[in-house]
Image (cartoon, rainbow, N blue to C red):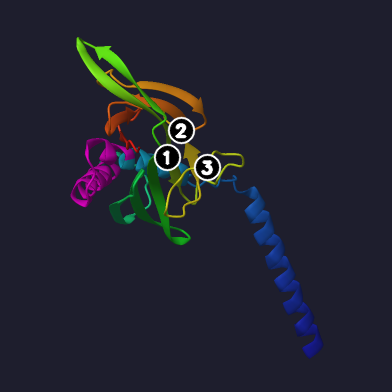
């Protein structure tokens, strides 16, 4: 008798399992999706970092820009990861200017960093020549310039074969070589390779890149 009750209980479990499976199969399938926001947010932070450098970056300026972005995120539902920290720093040497913006974002993996690095490294003076510009004679000095951006993010993997970028803070990411120009029209600029230019400037001089970020050329020798 006890054995028969055990058989009925097992039969009941099997019937219940079959009914559950049938009920699941009768339901209309619902698509599963997730918002892919890492690459988009990284691009937004890269733009923000470059914008800060273009206007003369400081931690106060950067904090204001970040807050503007967070306000836009709240009102426009950009679905951004929370930004828990942001700061600006720079480094200089005898022939190099470096600017950095760092952002800490809270992803599903935890705290992660997005960074923008901009580096301008000048070579020694090669020769000089006179140039008449708008009725004024200038002595221009020929030198070389390596200028590059690095965009580091867990969502932007490094690209094999990218040109090297002279930065003193180790970052791995996309290396980009922006176009550069002289807003005053005096300097002479010729690209001679990836992220490399031959420039002629009247002493220490500031060019601009395509994002209006300052490009400081240091004349040596």
Q: Which portion, as a residue range, is magenta? A: 50-74
- Packing grade of label 3 (10 A; few <14, some 14-19, many >=20) is few
From the image, state whether disc 1 or disc 3 is nearer to you. 3
Q: Is residue 180 in view from this perspective?
A: no
The magenta stretch spans residue 57: yes
Say what secondary structure mark 2 lies in: loop
Instruction: Name the residue carrying label 3.
Output: 164
Q: Residue at x 54, y 38 (%)?
A: 163
Instruction: Name the residue carrying label 2.
Output: 177
Q: Residue at x 68, y 58 (%)?
A: 21
Of pointers 2 and 1, the one earlier in the residue sequence: 1
From the image, state whether disc 3 or disc 2 is nearer to you. 3
Alpha carbons under labels 1 and 3: distance apart? 10 Å
Instruction: Name the residue carrying label 1.
Output: 149
User: In which quadrant of the rendered image does the N terminus lie?
Assistant: bottom right
Q: Are marks 2 and 1 in contact (CB under 8 Å)?
A: yes
Alpha carbons under labels 2 and 1: distance apart? 6 Å
User: In which quadrant of the rendered image does the C terminus lie?
Assistant: top left
The magenta stretch spans residue 7: no
Of pointers 1 and 3, the one earlier in the residue sequence: 1
């Amino acid at each position: 008798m006890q054995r028969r009750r055990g058989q009925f209980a097992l039969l009941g479990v099997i019937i219940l399992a079959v009914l559950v499976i049938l009920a699941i199969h009768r339901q209309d399938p619902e698509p599963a999706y997730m918002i892919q926001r890492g690459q988009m947010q990284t691009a937004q932070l890269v733009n923000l970092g470059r914008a800060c450098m273009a206007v003369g970056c400081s931690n106060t300026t950067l904090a204001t820009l970040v807050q503007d972005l967070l306000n836009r995120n709240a009102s426009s539902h950009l679905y951004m990861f929370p930004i828990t920290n942001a700061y600006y720093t720079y480094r200089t040497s005898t022939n190099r200017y470096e600017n950095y913006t760092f952002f800490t974002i809270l992803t599903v993996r935890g705290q992660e960093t997005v960074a923008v690095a901009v580096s301008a490294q000048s070579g020694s003076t090669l020769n000089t020549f006179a140039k008449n510009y708008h009725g004024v004679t200038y002595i221009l000095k020929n030198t070389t310039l390596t200028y590059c951006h690095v965009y580091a993010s867990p969502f932007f993997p490094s690209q094999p074969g990218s040109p090297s970028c002279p930065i003193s803070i180790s970052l791995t990411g996309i290396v980009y070589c922006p176009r550069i120009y002289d807003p005053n029209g005096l300097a002479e600029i010729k690209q001679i390779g990836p992220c490399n230019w031959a420039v002629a400037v009247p002493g220490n001089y500031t060019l601009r890149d395509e994002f209006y970020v300052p490009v400081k050329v240091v004349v040596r020798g």
